[in-house]
Image (tube, helix red, strand yellow):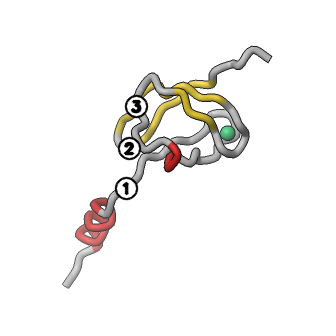
């Protein structure tokens, strides 16, 4: 008999990918283009084209900061 907890744990262990939400358009950035994303890396939002600097990565969540391209 499976408890709800054990089901949740098994789902968490099935390779949870990194999540990066674009601070500009609030959409998740496709990180498959950046398989080795690390802090200090510059990535680009595939939705709005915003250039983002990776600040930190904690708990599978990628923190970013908008880089003003100086328009
Ligand atoms: Zn975006």
Check disc 1 and report the residue beneath it: 16
Quarter of the render that holds ligand 1 = top right
Query: Residue 15: percent from the left, percent from the top?
Result: 33, 58
Q: Report how far apart the C-alphas of labels 2 and 3 lie in the structure.
A: 12 Å
Q: Quadrant of the C terminus?
A: top right
**Chain-order first, disc 2 or disc 3:** 3
Q: Mark 1 and mark 2 in contact (Cβ < 8 Å)? A: yes
Task: Name which quarter of the figure residue 4 lies in.
Answer: bottom left
Of the two numbered discs 2 and 1 on the same chain, state the one appearing first in sequence: 1
The relative height of residue 28 versus residue 65 in the rendered view (above or below) is below
Q: In the image, what residue occupies the spot 45% across and 22% down? A: 40
Mark 1, secondary structure of its residue: loop
How packed is label 1: few (under 14 Cα within 10 Å), some, or many (20 or more)? few
User: Rounded to the nearest whole Å, what is the CA distance between mark 2 and mark 1?
Assistant: 7 Å
Q: Considering the numbered disc 3 on the image, is that residue within a helix, a strand or a loop?
A: loop
Q: Quadrant of the N terminus?
A: bottom left
Residue drawn 40% across the image and 39% down it: 36
Crowding near pointer 3: few (<14 within 10 Å), some, many (20+)? some
Residue topped by disc 2: 60
In the image, which disc is placed on residue 62? none
Q: Position of residue 55 (x, y in %)?
A: 46, 25
Image depth: mark 2 or mark 3 in front: 3
Q: How many marks?
A: 3
Q: Earlier in the sequence, mark 3 or mark 1?
A: 1
Place of residue 41 in the rendered image (x, y in percent of width and height, measured from the top left): 48, 27
- Residue placed under numbered mark 3 in the picture: 38
Quarter of the rendering containing residue 6: bottom left
Q: Nearer the viewer, mark 3 or mark 1?
A: 3
């Amino acid at each position: 008999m499976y408890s709800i907890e054990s089901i949740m744990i098994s789902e968490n262990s099935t390779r949870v990918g990194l999540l990066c939400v674009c601070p500009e358009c609030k959409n998740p950035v496709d990180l498959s283009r950046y398989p080795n994303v690390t802090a200090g890396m510059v990535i680009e939002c595939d939705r709005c084209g915003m250039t983002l600097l990776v600040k930190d990565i904690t708990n599978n969540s990628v923190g970013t900061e908008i880089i003003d391209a100086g328009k």
